[in-house]
Amino acid sequence: MNSHFLDQFLFVALPYVCLFTFFLMTIYRYRMQTFSYSSLSSQFIENKQHFWAVVPFHYGILVVTAGHLIAFLIPRTVLAWSSHPLRLYVLEISALIFGILTLIGLVGVVVRRFSNTKIRKVTTVTDWILFGMLLVQTISGIGVAIFYPWGSSWFATNLSPYLWSIFKLNPEIAYVAAMPHLVKLHIVLAFLTIGFFPFTRLVHLLVVPNPYLWRKPQVVRWYRRPKQM
Amino acid sequence: MNIRSQVSMVFHLDKCIGCHTCSIACKNVWTDRKGAEYMWWNNVETKPGTGYPTKWEDQEKYKGGWESNGNGKLDIKSTSKARIVPNIFHNPHMPSMDDYYEPWTYDYQNLFNAKEGPDQPTAEPISMIDGEKIDVQAGPNWDDDLGGSPIYAENDPNLEGLTEQQRLQLSSVERLVFFYLPRICNHCLNPCCVASCPSGALYKRGEDGIVLIDQQKCRAWRSCVAACPYKKTYFNWFTGKSEKCILCFPRLETGQAPACFHSCVGRIRYLGVLLYDADRLEEVAKLPDDQLVEGQRSLILDPHDSAVIAQAKKDGISDGVIESAQKSPVYRFVMEWKIALPPHVEYRTLPMLFYVPPMSPVQASKPEDTIHHETEDLFHDIDSSRVPMKFLANLFGAGHEGGVRYALAKQKAVRWHRRAETVGDISRDLADRILHEANCTREEADEIHKLTSLCTFEDRFVIPPMHREQAIEMMKEPHEHREETGFGFVGGPRRGL
Ligand code: SF4
Ligand code: SF4
């Protein structure tokens, strides 16, 4: 009964609070404090370690997140694809590699920010909390990959339906209630990160510069556009 | 034809005394803020020298500007479209603070708070970033007047292609020579900074061509810093936004010259409107190196030509701006007299700040140190002047000497002409011959002389009416606009968390 209550809190209440905060606050911040939307790059202050920390981190986390997203969106396709053992191995191993890449990069980021006094000046408390969360999240993710393998399949069969049930406003926690503790930690922390997202520098993710690839190179702004144009 | 107007500039290097008043005026008005301490939107460097940031002209290192990608198109050297995706996390060609300098102040508090002791307390230099003591190694203008050290002059990228003898000529002690190069953003016609921005935060204003960075849209991808070959966009390390010279547009809009122009002690700065054909930009930016200076001139249209005026009106340029273009001192220097040249035109951004190349002393480069007043070899001293022509050509002609020689010869002829007029120690005939050979007339020489040395504020700065208020009125009821706009930010800009 007690644990059921806890599960209700962690996997129903918390996700909704976090998702609600995420949508409300990102929009609010974008409208009221657009200026604060920035990646706040510190490459200008330190240019060498930067490469070895930031690049593996970003590539790692992008691929891993994309993997989660795909398994969430098209679980059946993922299942079908990895029904072949060789493909399953490839999927599992590459997921693990990118997870470790993320971890290496993240440790690099933290060490770099901590050891350089100038960069510490542009690192806020929020940043440190965020780094802590991401660190635990990455380690728990790698742990899940090692101790509970074939995640690409059980994610598709169990977690994907749970996540869908959240979005369908009809949460079914039976899927997650039976999960090992490490997986539960990973899920809870994921929602917490989403809730914390709008208060951090992570918002730069939402303003990725896609139009660049197809806009004309030069940008001209007019106060008053000449008639014939 | 698609005519646009551009607020353009001329810096007359022969008049610059290297006083840095302009830099200080700009610093006081715009960059005296946290995160911007190291920025000098206006800086003055000694040439030959490495400049600020160090060796900014070395595009092997910084990869600024445009390059031809082989199939007749121009690409951004640092991060073209194809390269932006893999390089967005770490910009490989971004200069770091070490390439500029680490801003510092002095620990003045120590003068008051130090414990009593046998020595006078001192105010040691401390970093303006982390407050730690620093050992100051370089500053933004430490190469000033060659700074007592040959390393600055010897490492100037413009020395490329100079013979050993020419290099010696520049640096041997008794013959040492230098001049000053004040620099601001060139508000280019084909700005690489704008083209490189992944967020589209940079833009050129349609009405006056001023290049700005939208602070609300900048997300710190840092592409513009790497892409601008003149290194005139700067990264604010505190706010996480890039910033650049805004040509004091709030001053221009109220009819005042930009702060650096206004304060210039040597009165070397001129500002005025040029009309140009925006349809031909791409074609001109792609021309081979030796045709670029002429190509850029061919973009600029004659504001007295009735066909141009008619088309300009059709393209929405107001009568006031056209009138102002007709009086533009920049038009006279660049187009009529052709003595002002764009800097490093080979970067292909089509800069709209033009420089009148400086004359330099001659005598000491001659074998016998006697002064010849009436040499018959009229332009001998231009070729043998102490700043080698090739050096100036690398700066102002993509390595080609023609434009620089023409500009120097004309300036020289003006001097001889004025000497014949006022001092009278050389004959009128000789002066006329020189004028003729420099493709100049007496009238033109007098006008150049007047605008160079007897110019008033109104002659130097012909600021077009910007009609911003009218533009707003056309789109919206002014009172409504005022209610909505305020000062542009609700609650003031705050750095992100
Ligand atoms: S000088 Fe640099 S910053 Fe200024 S417009 Fe040209 S490319 Fe942009
Ligand atoms: S204020 Fe004028 S004369 Fe003095 S350094 Fe600046 S440009 Fe040169």
Image (tube, helix red, strand yellow):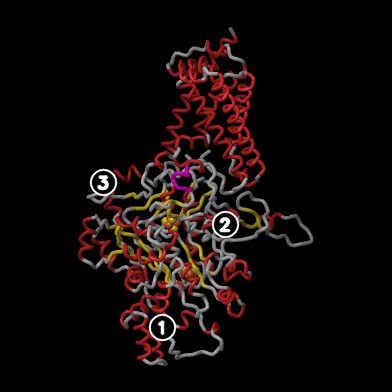
Disc 3 marks which residue?
B475
Q: Is residue B460 found left or right of A86 in the rendered image?
A: left
Instruction: Please state the chain letter of the residue tagged with numbered disc 1 in the rendered image.
Output: B
Magenta segment main secondary structure: helix
The Cα atoms of the two marked residues, 1 and 2, are separated by 39 Å
Mark toward the viewer: 3 or 2: 2
Rendering coords of residue A57 (x, y %): 58, 36
The Cα atoms of the two marked residues, 3 and 2, are separated by 43 Å
Q: Start and end of the magenta stretch? A: B79-84
Disc 2 marks which residue?
B100
Q: Is residue B245 visible?
A: no
Figure quadrant of the N terminus of chain B? bottom left
Mark 2 crowd level (few <14, some 14–19, many ≥20, 10 Å Cα): many
Q: Are marks 3 and 1 on the same chain?
A: yes
Number of numbered labels in the structure image: 3
Rendering coords of residue B288 (x, y %): 40, 62
Q: Is residue A136 above or below residue B424?
A: above
**3 or 1: tag closer to the N-terminus:** 1
> Tag on residue B415?
1
